[in-house]
Amino acid sequence: MSVHEPVTMFNEVPVLDGGVNVATAIAGEETTVWNAPRHAFLGLLNRYPAIGLGLLRVLAQRNHFLISQYEDLSFRSVVARTAKLILTLSRQGRDPIDRHANPNTELAARVATVPEAFSRALGLMRKSHLIRCTRDVITVLTPDGLTEMADL
């Protein structure tokens, strides 16, 4: 569903509504996680309302992200979703993508497909001279071409 960087709050909905966890978090590297019980977290929100206002902003951003993901899955092909992800990870083609930090299995999951389909999409981009792939990096050669392929 998403990738969180260090020092990021996640899975806040169950602590707010008392419901069950709707997703599983998997750490990609050594991680320290702090679990806030519902009663303690609600007490913190009552004592410091500014935290609640900040949380509303975070939840609104995550809602926008979720709608964007739904739109991608509904209206974009695997190739288009892959092109969009490559553009995002490369900062619109400015930076190479480290393949060791971003293996195909993880990138495929991020575009909601299997590694084989993701690899085929990369192959199409390579044949179209939009990207260069080595064992170590993916380099964007033609950001405008990827943008067009991503249907952006």
Image (cartoon, rainbow, N blue to C red):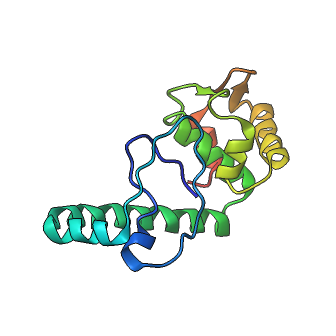
Left or right of 43, for residue 104: right
Task: Indicate the quadrant where residue 13 lies.
Answer: bottom left
Residue 152 placement: quadrant: bottom right
Quarter of the image where one finds residue 7? top left
Q: Please state if 140 lies on the left or on the right of 18 as rendered.
A: right
For the image shown, how many numbered marks are present on the structure? 0
Q: Position of residue 72 (x, y in %)?
A: 61, 62
For the residue pair 104 and 39, the one nearer the viewer reads as: 39
32, 123: nearer the viewer: 32
Residue 75: horizontal and vertical position, in percent?
A: 65, 67
Q: Nearer the viewer, residue 33 or 102?
A: 33
Q: Position of residue 41 (x, y in %)?
A: 30, 66
Please indicate whether residue 11 sits to the left or right of residue 108 in the image.
left
Say above or below: 72 vs 146. below
Q: Residue at x 75, y 21 (%)?
A: 135
Residue at 57% in and 54% down:
25
* Quarter of the picture holding the N terminus: bottom right
Q: Is residue 151 above or below residue 136?
A: below
Residue at 29% x, 63% y is 55
The percent position of residue 46, horizontal first and vertical second, equals: 18, 72
**Considering depth in this image, is 87 or 63 the residue closer to the camera?**
63
Q: Residue at x 21, y 61 (%)?
A: 51
